[in-house]
Amino acid sequence: MKKLMTEKRKYTDEPGADKGAIHLMINRWCGNSCPFCCNKQYDLDTVPVATVEELKAAHTVMLTGGDPFYVTGIIDICSHLRHDYPNIKQLYIYTSGRWMFLNEEVMVHYDQLFTYVDGINFSPKNKCDYAAIKKMLTKRDFAPEFFIHVRSNRIILMPNDFMTREEQEKFIESLHLKGLAFYGAKFEVEYREWQEEFQPNGGVWRRLPVFL
Ligand code: SF4
């Protein structure tokens, strides 16, 4: 694997980017250390702080980090976003998986979370992430009740050093996504490559002035 560039890039919005689709970084910590993490590639101080005007004009907000599920009070954050900015039509959360599963507030009060969130973007990076996603998606007293409301989901799989692509495909099969589709839940599955020079793909990136 090639070495990550040492000089950090300055963030700028892509020309023509949809400013109504905001990737909102709320924290920095995720517990992983992926060599080509976009957070390592960019100087995060150059990511603009989200303004009220921008949030008032947003149709979609994608909470990202770090891992937003590591943040205490994540359900309240989602609730305030939806109530303060009713213009936001879609709210998604990006997670590698295990912090969602380990977040007791989320697993106990998921009936609150599902009223605010339209989809979860899972992107497992290590074995614990894979195990957590499997536990959640096959958990009978959780998955049908949660994903009947949270329907626009995605699972993004990156190459790793402990699974072949074939094993990743078997992992996806083991999740029985067709069973969840019965409840109306959609899970798009994407196999992506790491980008040595990460390119934002759609929307703009914004951050909080302090990371939670
Ligand atoms: S899990 Fe995501 S945020 Fe964390 S190091 Fe890996 S790519 Fe970066």
Image (tube, rainbow, N blue to C red):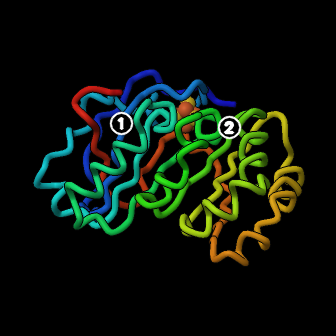
Percent from the top left, x then y, of residue 193? Answer: 65, 49
Give the secondary structure at mark 2.
loop
**Mark 2 within 8 Å of ligand 1, using the beta carbon:** yes
Q: Residue at x 42, y 39 (%)?
A: 74
- Nearest the viewer among 2 and 101 is 101
Tell me where residue 20 sits by quadrant.
Answer: bottom left
**Can you say whether 21 is above or below 23 in the image?**
below
Q: Residue at x 59, y 28 (%)?
A: 35
Ligand 1 in which quarter: top right
Can see residue 34?
yes
Residue beneath label 2, please? 125
Please rate how many residues cluster around mark 2, counting C-alpha atoms within 10 Å: few if below 14, some from 14 to 19, many from 20: many
Q: Is residue 54 left or right of residue 94?
A: left
Q: Is residue 65 left or right of residue 129?
A: left
Q: Amino acid at mark 1?
A: Ile
Percent from the top left, x then y, of residue 58? Answer: 24, 62
- Nearest the viewer among 164 and 121 is 121
Q: Residue at x 36, y 49 (%)?
A: 78
Real-space Cα distance between discs 2 and 1?
Answer: 20 Å
Residue beneath label 1, please? 26
Percent from the top left, x then y, of residue 28? Answer: 42, 28
Quadrant housing the N terminus: top right
Q: Is residue 1 left or right of residue 109?
A: right
Q: Earlier in the sequence, mark 2 or mark 1?
A: 1
Q: Amino acid at mark 2?
A: Lys
**Can you say whether 162 is above or below 92 in the image?**
above
Q: Residue at x 17, y 63 (%)?
A: 57
Tell me where residue 159 sits by quadrant.
Answer: top right
Please rate how many residues cluster around mark 1, counting C-alpha atoms within 10 Å: few if below 14, some from 14 to 19, many from 20: many
